[in-house]
Image (tube, helix red, strand yellow):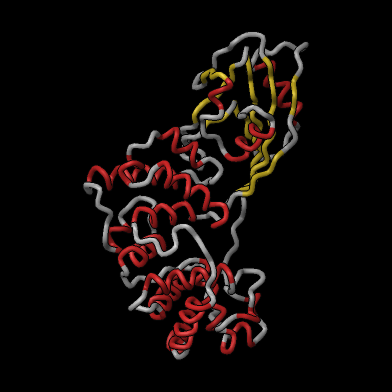
């Protein structure tokens, strides 16, 4: 399979690079960038994030933290607030950790080799190859979902992309196709090609410069590639947040659990693995946790849903206006004006804005 694929390697590389020269109109603020800090920052932001969503975050980060030294001195709370809405907050923690390492231990000098880039926290083969090729023109091919989709369709490869052998195969094939004289431009071209032409669901085959000998196109099997051996089983969670207030202050805590929201703030949380009745939960919490009098109103929000890669989260908010300030272990009372300064999970942040609490 591998040797057969290489027979059309020159056609693939030549036509891809020609498309990049005359047909690639995709614009991004970090495109053709040579500063390894800005390339690294953009790649970390774009992990699990669409370009359209990540772009304003990148611009805000560059404005506030124009270099790795500035980022290393960032206040963690401000950093999380700036990241709010992007999700996968381990990326944010890794940014700060790596910025401090480069600034303090590497004397502000970004690693200049693929292997040394791989040693950075939060940097995998794809990000290391991107920084190495874009910043230093080192011959390392990027391999992600875009790349494996393009290669599997063009060469008609039915090896699953989500198993060890498949990952190794596509990595080897991608390296073989790489334009060693222009690795940065080639890597950018194949990424742009996957985003604008060889798209997942609606590929633009009519304008594709590779369609003449593309196996998937010429056998009418575009939807069959890439092949996956398994599908992700999503976990479903129901979260009920109680927004308890007293004289203009709100009860919150900072999460320290090792999960996707570690370091963010939240209101009192009740979690269930099955859907529950919010009104019933609110009544129980009011009496047993918040000592809330029966005569005072309880207000419930509608249910909101947030889709994450490995889980679906259903969220409801319970509003309680308390008659006295209670103390809960791990929680603190903050004034309303501070809410907009703190980082919350996206679904909570969106609700606070829509309800006027974070304005």
Instruction: Place residue 138 in its image quadrant.
Output: bottom left
Q: Is residue 39 left or right of residue 218?
A: left
How many labels were placed on the picture?
0
In this orientation, which residue lies closer to the viewer: 149 or 53?
A: 53
Instruction: Place residue 270 in its image quadrant.
Output: top right
- Residue positioned 37% across, 46% down in the render: 66
- Residue positioned 73% across, 31% down in the render: 301
Image: 221 above or below 286: below
Give the percent coordinates (x, y) of residue 206.
65, 81
Give the percent coordinates (x, y) of residue 334.
54, 19
In this orientation, which residue lies closer to the viewer: 318 or 132?
A: 132
- Residue positioned 76% across, 27% down in the render: 279
Image: 310 above or below 270: below
- Is the C terminus in the top left, top right, bottom left or bottom right quadrant? top right
Q: Is residue 107 left or right of residue 50?
A: left
Image: 43 above or below 9: above
Image: 218 above or below 75: below
Residue that extends furthest to the top in the rendered view of this protein: 324
Q: Is residue 355 visible from the viewing direction of this image?
A: yes
Instruction: Place residue 152 in its image quadrant.
Output: bottom right
Give the percent coordinates (x, y) of residue 39.
39, 57
- Residue positioned 59% across, 73% down in the render: 197
Q: Is residue 2 left or right of residue 103?
A: right
Q: Is residue 125 visible from the viewing direction of this image?
A: no
Give the percent coordinates (x, y) of residue 56.
53, 49
């Amino acid at each position: 399979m591998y040797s057969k694929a290489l027979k059309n390697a020159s056609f693939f590389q030549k036509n891809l690079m020609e498309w990049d020269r005359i047909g690639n109109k995709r614009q991004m603020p970090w495109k053709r960038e040579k500063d390894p800090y800005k390339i690294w920052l953009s790649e970390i932001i774009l992990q699990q994030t669409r370009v359209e969503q990540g772009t304003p975050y990148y611009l805000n980060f560059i404005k506030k933290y124009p270099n790795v030294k500035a980022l290393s001195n960032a206040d963690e709370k401000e950093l999380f607030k700036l990241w709010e809405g992007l999700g996968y907050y381990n990326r944010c923690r890794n940014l700060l950790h790596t910025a401090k390492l480069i600034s303090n231990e590497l004397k502000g000098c970004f690693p200049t080799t693929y292997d040394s880039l791989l040693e950075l926290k939060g940097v995998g083969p794809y990000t290391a190859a991107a920084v190495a090729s874009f910043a230093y023109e080192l011959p390392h091919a990027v391999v992600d979902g875009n790349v494996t989709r393009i290669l599997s369709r063009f060469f008609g490869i039915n090896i699953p992309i989500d198993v060890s052998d498949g990952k190794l195969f596509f990595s080897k094939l991608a390296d073989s196709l790489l334009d060693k004289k222009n690795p940065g431009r080639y890597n950018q071209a194949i990424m742009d090609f996957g985003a604008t032409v060889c798209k997942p669901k609606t590929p633009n085959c009519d304008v594709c410069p590779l369609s003449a000998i593309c196996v998937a196109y010429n056998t009418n099997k575009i939807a069959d590639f890439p092949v996956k051996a398994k599908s992700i089983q999503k976990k479903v969670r129901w979260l009920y947040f109680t927004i308890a207030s007293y004289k203009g202050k709100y009860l919150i805590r900072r999460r320290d659990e090792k999960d996707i929201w570690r370091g963010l703030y939240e209101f009192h949380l009740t979690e269930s693995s099955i859907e529950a009745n919010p009104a019933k939960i609110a009544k129980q919490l009011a009496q047993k946790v918040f000592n809330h009098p029966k005569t005072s109103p309880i207000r419930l929000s509608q249910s909101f849903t947030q889709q994450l890669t490995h889980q679906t989260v259903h969220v409801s908010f319970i509003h309680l206006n308390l008659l006295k300030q209670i103390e809960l272990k791990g929680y603190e009372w903050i004034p309303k004006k501070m809410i907009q300064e703190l980082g919350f999970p996206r679904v909570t942040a969106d609700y606070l804005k829509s309800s006027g609490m974070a304005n």
